[in-house]
Amino acid sequence: MPKHIKTFKKILVMEVTMEYLDLLKKAKEHMPKLQSSSERFEMPKAQGHIQGNKTIINNFVAIAKTLGRNQDKLLKYLQRELATPAVVDGPRLVLGRKISSNFINQKIEQFAKDFVLCKECGKPDTKLEKEDRVLFVRCTACGARHPVKSKI
């Protein structure tokens, strides 16, 4: 192949590449900025309202799913800690008295700290195991195992 044709092909490839890179740069400028947390696990927050003498948490099932725990265990824990009867109504939790969302969120965080998050690595990749009469939190990420006071 003659030298001038090889040179022409090189120039053509460089121009196409430069156009492509310019187009990528322009497209990136028009993209929305990604807002991501450095944590892959975010503590769930209770969303709800007070209706008469009852407190309703609309996202109870989602909270239990995020924590990776059975909703019956979370329900039992919240009933004991909040000192109120409660009923699961579909995805909602109906508490038997007026309770502030801050107090409910504190109890959910305490539940996560005691029964979900690993005390060694802090990750939420844990499972509850019962041996004899002792409840353990076993981390599937680091392998640590810790006994917990059985409040559930």
Image (cartoon, helix red, strand yellow):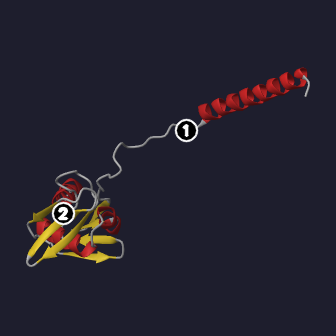
Bin the neighbour count of mark 2 within 10 Å (Cα to Cα): few under 14, some 14-19, many 20 and up: many
Residue 40 position, x and y percent, is 36, 50
| Quadrant showing the C terminus | bottom left
**Closest to the observer: 96 or 2?**
2
At label 2, the amino acid type is: Phe
Quadrant in the picture for residue 11: top right
| Quadrant showing the N terminus | top right
Left or right of 58 in this view: 16: right
Name the mark on residue 115: 2
Residue 90 position, x and y percent, is 36, 76
**Which residue is located at x 21 percent, y 73 percent?**
73
Bin the neighbour count of mark 1 within 10 Å (Cα to Cα): few under 14, some 14-19, many 20 and up: few
Residue ID for mark 1: 32
At label 1, the amino acid type is: Pro
Sequence-first tag of 1 and 2: 1
**Closest to the observer: 145 or 116?**
145
**Which residue is located at x 72 percent, y 26 percent?**
18
Q: Does dot 2 land on a helix, a strand or a loop?
A: helix
| Vertical order, 7 against 74 (above or below) | above
